[in-house]
Image (spheres, coloured by chain):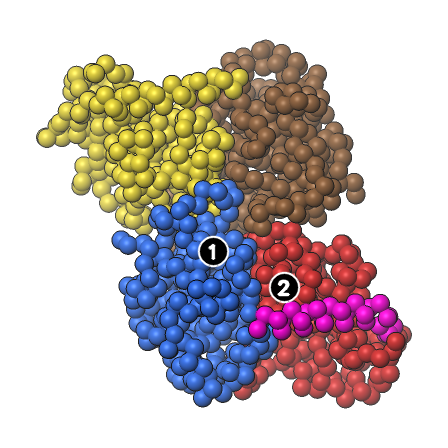
Chain colours: A yellow, B red, C brown, D blue
Amino acid sequence: MTDYTASEIMTVVAARALRDDDVCFVGIGAPSGAANLARLTHAPNVTLIYESGTIGTRPNVLPLSIGDGELCETARTTVSVPEMFRYWLQGGRITLGFLGGAQIDRFGNLNTTVIGDYDRPKVRLPGGGGAPEIATHCGRVLIIMAQSERSFVERLDFVTSLGHGEGGEHRRQMGLHTQGPTQVFTDLCVMEPDPESRELVVTALHPGVTREAVTERTGWPARFAEALSETPAPSAHELATLRDLQERTRRAHGEAA
Amino acid sequence: MTDYTASEIMTVVAARALRDDDVCFVGIGAPSGAANLARLTHAPNVTLIYESGTIGTRPNVLPLSIGDGELCETARTTVSVPEMFRYWLQGGRITLGFLGGAQIDRFGNLNTTVIGDYDRPKVRLPGGGGAPEIATHCGRVLIIMAQSERSFVERLDFVTSLGHGEGGEHRRQMGLHTQGPTQVFTDLCVMEPDPESRELVVTALHPGVTREAVTERTGWPARFAEALSETPAPSAHELATLRDLQERTRRAHGEAA
Amino acid sequence: MIRHTDLASAIEANVADGDTLALEGFTHLIPFAAGHEIIRQGRRRLTLIRMTPDLIYDQMIGMGCADKLVFSWGGNPGVGSLHRFRDAVENRWPTPLDVEEHSHAALANAYDAGAAGLPCAILRGYLGSDLAKVNGNIRSVTCPFTGEVLSAVPALRPDVAIVHAQRADREGNVLIEGIVGVQKEAVLAAKRAIVTVEEVVDDLTDVHPNATFLPFWTVTAIALVPGGAHPSYAHGYYSRDNAHYKAWDAISRDRDSFLAWMKDNVLSKRPEDFATQAGRAA
Amino acid sequence: MIRHTDLASAIEANVADGDTLALEGFTHLIPFAAGHEIIRQGRRRLTLIRMTPDLIYDQMIGMGCADKLVFSWGGNPGVGSLHRFRDAVENRWPTPLDVEEHSHAALANAYDAGAAGLPCAILRGYLGSDLAKVNGNIRSVTCPFTGEVLSAVPALRPDVAIVHAQRADREGNVLIEGIVGVQKEAVLAAKRAIVTVEEVVDDLTDVHPNATFLPFWTVTAIALVPGGAHPSYAHGYYSRDNAHYKAWDAISRDRDSFLAWMKDNVLSKRPEDFATQAGRAA
């Protein structure tokens, strides 16, 4: 069973990074798919939290929004949105955050605000939402983004959410004790920050992906780890679980028309 | 039916000051008796709030504590204590507060902290509790206190809760837009702040009470209003309702032994 | 004051041109019927506050109701852009739109501070983010105990908060269950509050003691509008119409198709039509 | 970590001499059994935090467990003084007691700030009160938008929070209903949390979606102690023993009668005795 899409391997590999004892703040889209795949495979006890206030949710289908009814109905409890951001996120109770964006730079800083100038933007993106504080308050952050030269850029048009800032000890110097981005999962590879400079380094290539392909789709001079490995391909069980979940989701969202 | 105690007339007269549309923050003891008497007589729709978080409570017996089960069971809703003090009291949602104390001065400032020096007190009193912010955030404040020269004093040992401060426009100058104490109910009389100086002035004497009796039991030179009236005596209905409530309460608290 | 009224009267009596409005509901219980009524009544120059503008503000912005938006995430959840919002920001159509942009954490704290009667909220927020550079309402205070510099944002104090809830009783008490969002805070922060509800019941005595409950004296007007949250949803009544959220992407992408849709589905409709739209019997 | 344990083990593993403790429960659900176990284990030099010290801290102070008290109202509710607290402050018996005194509003905000990960809380508080003159932990910050001077107090961050709750499930999730006080805030503000419960059930899936709920990963240890809040109470289980609160006045007024009562009712008892005391079958 080696027949999978680039999006599927990105989701599967991200899912593997969740631990059974994680308390994970889940974003909509790829993060939600990855987090629930983890829950349905190797991490059955993982606690999933959505910013709508739902804690310990176990949705049978993926939500389209951050606050579908499914999330509340299958949650252990649901708190107000101020409580979610104050007691749970800022209170340091979340071990793992998931982020994505329109642009990322070599230090894992993210832009979800504008392309172009802020006051007269070429593209007005949705904005930060929960991301600026997810980026600083979660124990560690995973980033999922399909890779292209347009999105993996030399310089962000706008810093919405902090990654490793200007690199090195920048986060620590700002008074942060959380780890920031520990892994970036793309459709081509896995990147991790260098322990010293915090610059993102490619540590694993997905099966069949070349260094050249990654370099071509990275807007800065891509660096590769000495011990560059190959991502283990999605297992039959991982793929089947993901596809079942997505198929249930498609049926559920279509039926609501 | 003119046979009533000094404590009863104090409670009955205080009860009359509640309005049917008041949202009242109730303290334990005399305030709780007065507030519930109002609810059981002329103000059936008054909203009673206890600092334990119970909103719109209709206890059948008077609670001994601020948080007896009776209060929650008969409340419309119960919120957390931080929410009570933040959204409801500080949020300006309470029209009426009820306070008492060990000492009061001529401007309605109250001491419930210590008699004597703070660091080596002669008597360590319970302290402020909710009072410091009830005094400043409720639309208006009613004070109930049995009167004696020891408690109605020239100078407080400690200001726990603000009344009219040093008098005049003092509250306004501090940025407060609430009225502060509008009436003081004692076992002898009713006092109200002078509209200009805010010094407490005796505006009504309870039946049979002389000016001399009030002067004797006031630690500052008592002032009397020109139009000094006599408090209407408790009606048969008021007294019967109060006594029934207190009898039910006695039975309930005794039985719990 | 007449607390129970019809939606048109509630909006007419409480929402004026130039007002600052917060229509809240975090994905759940979004007050679409009230937003549509505001559009029909042609309100103008509104300042609109919402953490997630969602389709409801996309529609109000596209119809020219607003000249300012205070928000923290302006997308169509799980679908993509809010095209009318983008068109207003990128091309000033149909009218220029000022934006005051925050993070969710900051706006949630700002509602909380408004409800709590504070002038501002403090948070550990915006660290390393450029948002503070483009929003003059993101400032700082220093903790007098630790010296830590914290972000500060002004409390939100809308003229009117509008929310949709499951139930009200005859007296005007309101119950909200499920994903409760920032509705309680929005109502308590506002000068006036309008609530649309799925149902009016005789009394609400049988609810959980700690349920989210708005006493009658916190609510200015209540209007019964079954289905009034569609295409958002009401926990216990009907589900989110995810297909409609997806369809909105195509409807709203183009100005003409947007205007045509608004004419057919908003301008020529009434609050009573929501019951059918939400898939419930009228 | 073993989450479900017995009370003696939970206290032994989590409460050390010199720790800062918050035993919370606002009149309702006061963790008396846990307090008695701390007394039996002879803990010393504790800093005790509670909005209302109540009988439980009167007992712990009288038995010499504490050298500091952080509080906002130190009386026997509806009865009068806490005589052991007074004896410690007025006469330094059995040992001197430092006090850090606040208002309810400030302590509630300080717990809230602790749970919210902030270094301090801001409030409109203490206006015109002398408390700020005698408590160096009441300071101020200036609102950067309005210039208003607000009170600030440090966030509470106890080493251990101890609360009593109605129910826990096997996994260690905890449910609190009725007067919920500041228990959630105390638990989330603390480094470690011990919960005593009336009942352990298979699961807590049937509760109201917005009930006060502590997920298992916020709790360090859970001990089943039926009646463990007596003479306080547990909504749905047993009532407040108001007669005992009244009787405490005479018991505690005199040092010898206090010590005799503690010997008979605490030192020679076990957590299991609470079930009988609360009037429930063991």
Q: Which mark is residue B144?
A: none
Amino acid beneath label 2:
Ile
Q: Is residue A94 left or right of residue D238?
A: left
Using residue C160 as the reference point, say whether residue C5 is left or right of it.
Answer: right
Residue D181, visible in the rendered structure: yes
* Amino acid on which the number 1 mark rests in the picture: Gln
User: Chain ID for label 2?
Assistant: B
Q: Residues within 10 Å of mark 2 (few under 14, many from 20)?
A: many
The residue depicted at 55 percent of the width and 69 percent of the height is D241
- In the image, B52 versus D13, the foreground residue is D13
Q: Is residue B113 visible?
A: no
Q: Is disc 1 placed on a helix, strand or loop?
A: strand
- Residue stretch rendered in magenta on the structure: B230-257
Distance CA(mark 1)–CA(mark 2): 31 Å
The label nearer to you, 1 versus 2, is: 1
- Position of residue A8 relative to residue D160, above or below, is above
Foreground residue among A40 and B115: A40
Q: Which residue is mark 2?
A: B134
Residue D166: which numbered mark, if any?
Answer: 1
In the displayed structure, would residue B109 be above or below residue B138? below
**Would you call the spot at circle 1 few (<14 residues within 10 Å), some (14-19), or many (20 or more)?**
many
* Image height of D43 relative to D191, above or below: below
At x 77%, y 75%, the residue is B8
Residue at 81% in and 71% down? B239
Residue B60 position within the rendered picture, expressed as x and y whole percent measured from the top left: 69, 62
Relative image position of residue B156 (x, y in whole percent): 62, 80
Q: Is residue A228 above or below residue B232?
A: above
Magenta span: chief secondary structure: helix
Residue at 57 percent across and 53 percent down: it is: B79
